[in-house]
Amino acid sequence: MGSKQIAQETFDDAVQENITEFEMDPEEAVREAVQQFESQGVDLSNIVKAVRPPASENGQRQKHQILLTLDSLGRAVAESDVAELPEQLSAFAAQCKEQLAFRYLAGQNGAYPVVFSACQLASGDRDLLLQAFSTLSALLDGQPDLLDAAGQELLLQTLREQREDAEMTLAGIRCVRHACLKHEQNRQDFVKGGILPLLTGAIIQHGSSADVVRTAASALRIMTFDDDIRVPFGHAHDHAKMIVLENDGLRVLIEAAKAFTDNSGVLSELCATLSRLSVRNEFCQEIVDLGGLNFMVTLLADCMEHPDVVKQVLSAIRAVAGNDDVKDAIVDAGGTDLIVLAISHHLGNPQICEQGCAALCMLALRKPENCSVIMEGGGALAALQAMKAHPREVAVQKQACMLIRNLVSRSRDFSQPILEMGAENLITEARAAHRDCDDVARAALRDLGCKVELRELWTGQKGSLAQ
């Protein structure tokens, strides 16, 4: 994708030129303009790729449909026309949900103040406020910068005052999620404003609502992200600690899981959030003590046919296995056999192969007894099959190499059986194909007892160092 940006106006002019100058029909004119800009490396993800209605008789330029809808909503808000608002909010939200380009164009043309004013107008009317929040959520999706301090306060206040109302809570949390994804400042502001206890409280209060539990767990997880490229470092770790230590987050999430034993979507979300909270040794242990490990292992066994769930559970097992005592608990619970089964069953899925190898790699680290269990369960063979299935996936190659190395580094007896499975060729190929694999592949070959060609990083030939 290109990194250059253009204005909507520029794109519209190019389309219009194709129609008037080159007599193209509208669809062809749009296609041609898209091709023209993309060939120049322009990113068109924020551009509405449609023909703007022709200019009116007085020469005034017409607007794209989303802006006409926004104008109608703006009029209803300006006139405090509460009877007209539901229809206008619904129409605007529907168009915002169609694609990011529509939302972006609306956002650039003053949509946020209009929608925020609609939320304020609706404050005394529950159903209208629900609709206004739904519209705000649709607008904020992918553009968290739009939310201001007043909007944050309105969301926090509503979540505090309407905590008994599941639908209102869900609508508010959806807005918070969109506002915090890829926006570190919003995350920090919401945490300072007290969002964490509101999120854990929502999971407890509405523990029977799948939508609330899933969305609140997802929002908690987003508070632990470090995904805003504009910020050199975020507060992800601090937020994770606050969720666990100040808001009893681990217990809340694991207890919530008990109500949804048949709902893989909710369990997968809870699992993903637990893995983001496994940031300290004692947190990993607490997850096991609270029954979180049993829930993960059961989920992996029951949902083996659902690749998304399998990937999340493997990632969570990998995270909690950072604690050496937990490694043993996972092996004792039969986790290794299930992980090997997951890799073999989803051999065509590179993410599952990567997470599965990474989880086994953690279990094998510094644990010769676990290495024996992994070898007996076919873990080394599964990892080599994953390497063979995904030669171009550097992450799979890397994790498999690290697993092989961990298996043999303290148990040299395993070297021969692993070499007989064809490990040397696969690891050598990975090393040749992926620069990022060089270190781990070399270490694996060395510990397997193979001859390793060392790469000279610098020979001092081209000139001496400056004095």
Image (spheres, rainbow, N blue to C red):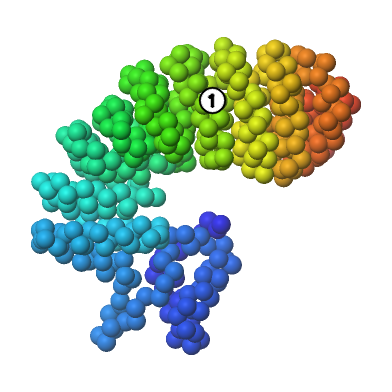
Up-down relation of residue 375 to residue 46 (above or below): above
Q: Quadrant of residue 216?
A: top left
Residue 289: % across, % down: 46, 13
Question: Can residue 66 be seen in this snapshot?
Answer: yes
| Residue 45 in the image: above or below residue 259 | below
- The image position of residue 17, as x and y in percent, is 45, 81
Q: Residue at x 27, y 61 (%)?
A: 92
Q: Position of residue 180 (x, y in %)?
A: 36, 40
47 or 178, nearer to the observer: 178
Q: Secondary structure at mark 1?
A: helix
Tag 1: amino acid: Val
Q: Residue at x 73, y 42 (%)?
A: 389
Q: Is residue 189 above or below residue 112?
A: above
Residue topped by disc 1: 297
Left or right of 361 on screen, residue 329:
left
Give whichever of 95, 257 is nearer the camera. 257
